[in-house]
Image: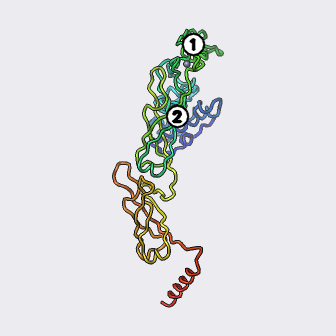
């Protein structure tokens, strides 16, 4: 059977660096991970081939042999065929460790990994992600918000055990070991006990509050202070404001993603603001001092903008420091007034007469 090209398998060039290689492999492993592709034999095969490719290309000596002689250079012995998917995990634990571990709410090793988490150990609460919508002014000058959250939390009545009065007894299915052995052909497979989910103990009687699940849905309100200068897509992290941990584990974090609503008067360009300043033809020609909205916390704030005589449509007038305050407190962006000359659609008889007269005067000059 001919083997695929290892560089192609990982979608990398022949000049790939060690760091890029590791990154490419992580990506592939994530894509074909068995937890993401349950019962998909093709994905599993890809997963193994990627591991094989990475094991060769990440070894400088093997990579050199492979570059010079191809698969033949590895002599069959050099490339470790990964027969068992568990081997993949045990060999590249450093990669999978930070790829799948610690994410909270990510996916774990399932039944494949060699590492087995103690189900009775303290567990960090899951992170919560939510969004907050702000006006442009709130995003620029800061705001406080009350955010309603609804999420599962360890049941207080049973301290998350799911047992009425906290009364537990050894699991009958696994005899308290948390694992059950099952013969499969010549092998004995050990799997997590389905009755107690690995805990080794069971509730004598289910807790009334959570019906034995150990969790209840809670609703709470979190007050957040959004600093001035934030923009759409930025996230605020509130440490320890996520879901509560279980068995004494720390709480997760709360991530709040900012969305800034469009503003009627001002369009944001990073820290500058663009305002369309509509002027009449006489104002543009003769020059004028106009009242324009000012970008301040007070929505009613205005400022005087000087339009010089002979201003053309599409010209910009700059108001220095009239933009968005920078996050680090170093001044503000500018306000750019984009001049639009308004052409009247309806005219009185008198206005028509005056314009015609004006038009004639241009012909004469
Ligand atoms: Zn059990
Ligand atoms: Zn309970």
Q: Which residue is mark 2?
A: 149
**Front residue (pair 164, 304):** 304
Residue 191 appears in the rendering: no
Q: Quadrant of the N terminus?
A: top right
Percent across and percent down for residue 118 are 50, 19
281 left or right of 187 in image: left
Percent across and percent down for residue 29 are 54, 35
> Vertical placement of 87 versus 306: above or below?
above
> Vertical placement of 2 versus 206: above or below?
below
Percent across and percent down for residue 60 are 44, 37
Q: Which residue is mark 1?
A: 203
Residue 260 appears in the rendering: yes
> Vertical placement of 3 versus 321: above or below?
above
Q: Quadrant of residue 211?
A: top right
Nearer the viewer's eye, disc 1 or disc 2?
A: 2
Q: Residues within 10 Å of mark 2 (few under 14, many from 20)?
A: some
Instruction: Estimate the spatial distance between the alpha carbons at disc 1 and disc 2, rounded to whole Å.
Output: 30 Å
């Amino acid at each position: 059977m001919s083997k695929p090209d290892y560089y192609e398998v990982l979608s990398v060039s022949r000049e790939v660096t060690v760091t890029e290689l590791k990154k490419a492999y992580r990506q592939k492993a994530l894509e074909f991970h068995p937890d993401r592709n349950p019962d998909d034999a093709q994905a599993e095969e890809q997963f193994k081939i990627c591991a094989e490719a990475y094991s060769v290309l990440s070894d400088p000596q093997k990579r050199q042999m492979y570059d010079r002689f191809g698969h033949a250079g590895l002599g069959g012995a050099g490339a470790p065929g990964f027969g068992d998917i568990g081997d993949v995990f045990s060999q590249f634990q450093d990669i999978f460790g930070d790829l799948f571990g610690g994410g909270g709410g990510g996916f774990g090793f399932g039944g494949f990994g060699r590492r087995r988490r103690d189900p009775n150990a303290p567990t960090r609460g899951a992170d919560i992600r939510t969004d907050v919508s702000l006006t442009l002014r709130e995003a620029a000058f800061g705001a406080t918000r009350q955010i309603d959250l609804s999420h599962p939390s360890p049941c207080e009545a049973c301290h998350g055990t799911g047992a009425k009065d906290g009364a537990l007894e050894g699991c009958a299915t696994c005899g308290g070991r948390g694992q059950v052995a099952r013969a499969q052909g010549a092998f004995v497979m050990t799997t997590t006990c389905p009755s107690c989910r690995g805990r080794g103990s069971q509730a004598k009687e289910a807790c009334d509050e959570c019906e034995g699940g150990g969790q209840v849905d809670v609703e709470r309100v979190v007050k957040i202070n959004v600093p001035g200068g934030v923009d759409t897509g930025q996230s605020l992290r509130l440490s320890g404001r996520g879901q509560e941990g279980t068995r004494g584990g720390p709480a997760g974090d709360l991530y709040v993603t900012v969305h800034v609503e469009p503003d009627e008067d001002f369009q944001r360009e990073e820290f500058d603001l663009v305002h369309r300043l509509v002027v009449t033809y006489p104002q543009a020609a003769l020059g004028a001092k106009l009242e324009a909205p000012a970008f301040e916390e007070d929505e009613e704030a205005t400022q005087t903008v000087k339009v010089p005589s002979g201003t053309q449509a599409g010209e910009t007038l700059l108001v220095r420091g009239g933009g968005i305050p920078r996050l680090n407190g170093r001044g503000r962006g500018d306000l750019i007034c984009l001049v639009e000359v308004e052409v009247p659609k309806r005219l009185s008889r008198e206005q028509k007469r005056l314009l015609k007269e004006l038009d004639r005067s241009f012909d004469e000059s």
